[in-house]
C-alpha cells in the first residue's frame, strides 16, 4: 500500500512540474535511440564481414604455377645426372609475374636428392618472364619416384604445385634416351628395358646389313628372355 502511495506522489509531482517530466522522458528516448544506433552499426559490420568472407571464398586464385620442365623426368643415379626444373608463375589472367618467390622442397628421406650444399629447400625469385629455374639439383642413390613441392608467394597470395620425378639406375645411353623421352613426352618416360630392346634391334639390323654385304642370306636372331633382356645371336 505504501508503494502505491509513493508512485502516486511521484506522478503528481511530475504533473505539477512539467519541465521535469519532459526532461526525464527525453532522456529515456535519447538512450533508446543510442542503443538502436549501436545495434544497427554492429549488424552492418557483421554483414560486411560475411560478404567479404564469401567473396574471398569464391574468388579465383590470383597465382598459378605452370610446370615448364622437370615433370616426369628420369634421373640417372649412377651418373648423378638430373634434368633441371623450371616453373612459371602467372596471375589470374595468365600473365607472368616477375619478382615472385618460389620455394622448392625435396623429400627428407627416400628417393630424391639435394640442392647446393646438401640443402633440401631452394628459394628462387622469378625473372621478367615469370620463371624460376632450379640449378644445382643432384639426385641421390635411392631408386624410386618422388615429388618436389613447389610454393609461390607474391603480395600476400600463394599457390602450390608438385613436380614428380623418378630416380633410376640406368646405363649412360639409356639415361640420355630416358631423359629426352621424359622431357618431350609430357612425363611418360621410357624404361631401361625398352631402351635395351631398341639398342638390340638396332645392333641386329647393323649385323644383318654386314652379312648381306658379304653375300650371306642368313640374318642374326634376336631373342628377348623372360627378364626382358634382349640378346643377339650369330647369323
Image: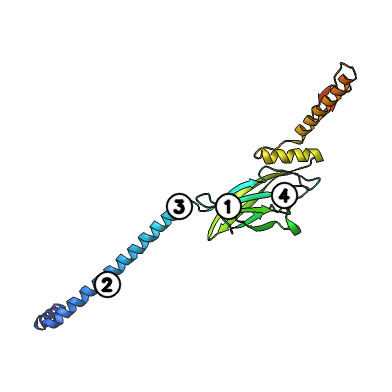
Residues tagged 3 and 1 counted as in contact (Cβ below 8 A): no
- The secondary element bearing badge 4 is classed as loop
Q: Which residue is mark 4?
A: 112
Q: Which residue is mark 1?
A: 89
Residue lying at the far front of the rendered structure: 213
Q: CA distance from mark 1 to mark 2?
A: 52 Å
Residue name at image x 77 percent, y 36 percent: 192
Q: Position of residue 81 (x, y in %)?
A: 77, 47
> Closer to the observer: label 3 or label 1?
1
Residues tagged 2 and 3 counted as in contact (Cβ below 8 A): no
> Closer to the observer: label 4 or label 3?
3
Q: CA distance from mark 3 to mark 1?
A: 18 Å
Q: Quadrant of residue 11?
A: bottom left
Residues tagged 4 and 3 counted as in contact (Cβ below 8 A): no
Q: Nearer the viewer, residue 161 or 134?
A: 134
Q: CA distance from mark 4 to mark 3?
A: 35 Å
Q: Which residue is mark 3?
A: 59
Q: Earlier in the sequence, mark 4 or mark 3?
A: 3
| Up-down relation of residue 200 to residue 61 (above or below) | above
- The secondary element bearing badge 1 is classed as strand
Q: Position of residue 115 (x, y in %)?
A: 73, 55
Q: Earlier in the sequence, mark 2 or mark 4?
A: 2
Q: Quadrant of the C terminus?
A: top right
Q: Which residue is mark 2?
A: 34
Amino acid at each position: 500500500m505504501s508503494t502505491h502511495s509513493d508512485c502516486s506522489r511521484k506522478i503528481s509531482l511530475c504533473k505539477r512540474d512539467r519541465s521535469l517530466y519532459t526532461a526525464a522522458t527525453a532522456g529515456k528516448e535519447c538512450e533508446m535511440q543510442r542503443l538502436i544506433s549501436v545495434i544497427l552499426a554492429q549488424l552492418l559490420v557483421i554483414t560486411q564481414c560475411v560478404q567479404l568472407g564469401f567473396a574471398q571464398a569464391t574468388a579465383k586464385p590470383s597465382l598459378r604455377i605452370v610446370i615448364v620442365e622437370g615433370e616426369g623426368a628420369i634421373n640417372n643415379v649412377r651418373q648423378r645426372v638430373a634434368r633441371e626444373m623450371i616453373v612459371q608463375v602467372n596471375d589470374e589472367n595468365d600473365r607472368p609475374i616477375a619478382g615472385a618467390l618460389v620455394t622448392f622442397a625435396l623429400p627428407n628421406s627416400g628417393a630424391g636428392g639435394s640442392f647446393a650444399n646438401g640443402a633440401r629447400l631452394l628459394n628462387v625469385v622469378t625473372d621478367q618472364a615469370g620463371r624460376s629455374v632450379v640449378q644445382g639439383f643432384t639426385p641421390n642413390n635411392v631408386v624410386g619416384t618422388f615429388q618436389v613441392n613447389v610454393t609461390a608467394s607474391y603480395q600476400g597470395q600463394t599457390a602450390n604445385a608438385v613436380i614428380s620425378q623418378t630416380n633410376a639406375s640406368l646405363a649412360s645411353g639409356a639415361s640420355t634416351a630416358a631423359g629426352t623421352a621424359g622431357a618431350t613426352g609430357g612425363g611418360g618416360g621410357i624404361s631401361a628395358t625398352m631402351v635395351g630392346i631398341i639398342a638390340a634391334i638396332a645392333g641386329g639390323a647393323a649385323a644383318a646389313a654386314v652379312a648381306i654385304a658379304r653375300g650371306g642370306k642368313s640374318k642374326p636372331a634376336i631373342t628377348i628372355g623372360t627378364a626382358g633382356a634382349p640378346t643377339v645371336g650369330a647369323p
